[in-house]
Each structure stands twice: as C-alpha cells, then as structure tokens.
C-alpha cells in the first residue's frame, strides 16, 4: 500500500499568508516561551507589523 505524505507550509503569524519555499521570510522561536516557531513574511517585516505567540500571548515587533 502506498503512503501519502502531505507537508503543511508555514504561514505568516500576522497576515496568515502561506510562505512558499524560496520566499524571503524569517522564522524564530518565541522569545518568551520558546515553544512556538514564529514565521513572518517579508511584507509584514518591512511594515514592522507585530507578531503574537499563539501559546503564551507574547507580542513583539
């Protein structure tokens, strides 16, 4: 039997847009809890939009 695998692409923490491979973006562990990877697209970084950790609620630029 063949096994099908799917990969979920990361999405921007602020705007929710899917970040595709090769696109300029940044990801980092939440500075407060360290349990969540925060992804930010280039546009949200450029405009300085905040991120919010879905686990601990920490907000940052």
Image: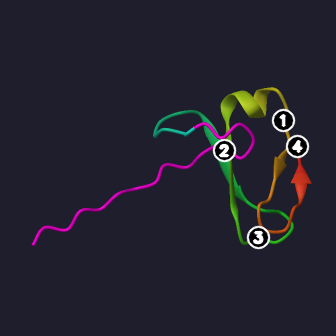
Q: Quadrant of residue 48?
A: top right
Classify mark 1: residues with Cα within 10 Å, few (<14), some (14-19) or many (20+): some
Q: Is residue 27 above or below residue 1?
A: above
Disc 4 vs disc 1: Cβ atoms closer than 8 Å?
Answer: no
Q: Name the residue beneath numbered marker 4.
A: 61
Marks 4/1: CA–CA distance: 6 Å
Q: Check disc 2 and report its element: helix, strand or loop.
A: strand
The tag earlier along the polypeptide, 4 or 1, is: 1
Give above or below for 42 relative to 52.
above
**Percent coordinates x, y for residue 35 in the rendering:** 72, 72
- Foreground residue among 60 and 8: 8
State the CA–CA distance, disc 2 to disc 3: 16 Å
| Residue at the spot 66% in from the left edge and 44% down from the top edge | 26
What residue is disc 3 on? 34
Closest to the camera, between mark 2 and mark 1, is: 1
Q: In which quarter of the image is the C terminus?
A: top right
Marks 3 and 4, how far apart at CA: 16 Å
| Tag 3 and tag 1, C-beta contact below 8 Å | no
Task: State yes or no: discs 2 and 1 in contact (Cβ < 8 Å).
Answer: no
> Which of the two marks, 3 or 1, is nearer to us in this view?
1
Considering every residue shown, the one lying at the far left of the view is 1
Which quarter of the rendering shows the N terminus? bottom left
Quarter holding residue 34: bottom right
Q: List x then y, in percent, for residue 58.
A: 89, 60
Q: Residue at x 82, y 26 (%)?
A: 47
Magenta span covers which residues? Answer: 1-17
- Residue at the (59%, 33%) spot, across then down: 24
User: Which quadrant of the view contains residue 5?
Assistant: bottom left
User: Which of 24/5 is in front?
Assistant: 5
Q: In this view, does 23 lie to the left or right of 36?
A: left
């Amino acid at each position: 039997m063949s096994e099908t695998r799917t990969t979920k692409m990361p999405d921007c923490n602020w705007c929710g847009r899917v970040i595709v491979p090769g696109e300029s973006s940044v990801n980092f562990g939440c500075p407060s809890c360290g349990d969540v990877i925060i992804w930010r697209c280039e546009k949200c970084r450029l405009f300085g939009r905040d991120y919010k950790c879905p686990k601990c609620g920490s907000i940052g630029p």
